[in-house]
Amino acid sequence: MNEATGLFVKIRNVVKQIPLGKVTTYGQIAKMVGITDSRKVGWALWGNQDPQIPCHRVIKKDGFLAKDYSLGGWEEQKRRLQKEGISFIKENQVDLEKHQWVC
DNA sequence: CCGTTGACCAGGC
DNA sequence: GGCCTGGCCAACG
């Protein structure tokens, strides 16, 4: 543990703090860890299926799910989100206005 | 140190 | 409205 690998652990730490029933965007997380590049967020989560890391709560700034989501596609992600009480506007778009995470 | 990669974002055509 | 390019910067070989 500890901030060993830098952003890798840092980003994972933030994602773990996302409350149930909330979602957040890559850009938002990027700001939290002190960076300006949202790609690092996705990059850090890539291949990470840790049960403590709800990657399915991490979506794009427009509320769309990541189309390159690896753990089964956005359809799997959507199913998990709905299970937590998240509302969907479209098949692959979350209602950000209601569920975007704010500290 | 260098080149490549990368689940994004914004701008241009 | 879809595709391309640039940017931005950490991790990895």
Image (tube, coloured by chain):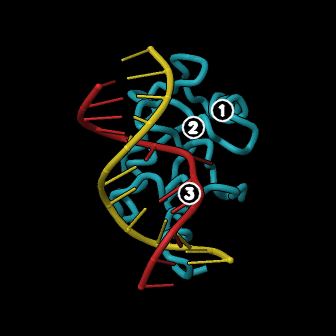
Chain colours: A cyan, B red, C yellow
Name the residue located 56 percent from the left edge and 29 percent from the top edge. A86
Chain that bears disc 3: A
Amino acid at circle 1: Trp
Which image quadrant is residue A1 in? bottom right
Give percent across and percent down for residue B6: 57, 52
Name the residue located 65 percent from the left edge and 41 percent from the top edge. A69
What residue did someone put label 2 on? Answer: A66
What is the tally of numbered marks visible in this picture? Answer: 3
Neighbor class of circle 1 (other Cα within 10 Å; few <14, some 14-19, many 20+) is: many
Secondary structure under tag 1 reads helix
Secondary structure under tag 3 reads helix
Q: Nearer the viewer, residue A100 or A9?
A: A9
Give percent across and percent down for residue B12: 24, 31
Question: Which dot marks residue A74?
Answer: 1
A89 horizontally vs B1: left or right: right
Q: Nearer the viewer, mark 1 or mark 3?
A: 3
Amino acid at circle 2: Ala
| Earlier sequence position, callout 1 versus callout 2 | 2
What residue did someone put label 3 on? Answer: A43
Q: Nearer the viewer, residue A25 or A51?
A: A25
A45 horizontally vs C1: left or right: right
Chain that bears disc 1: A
Give percent across and percent down for residue A28: 38, 49
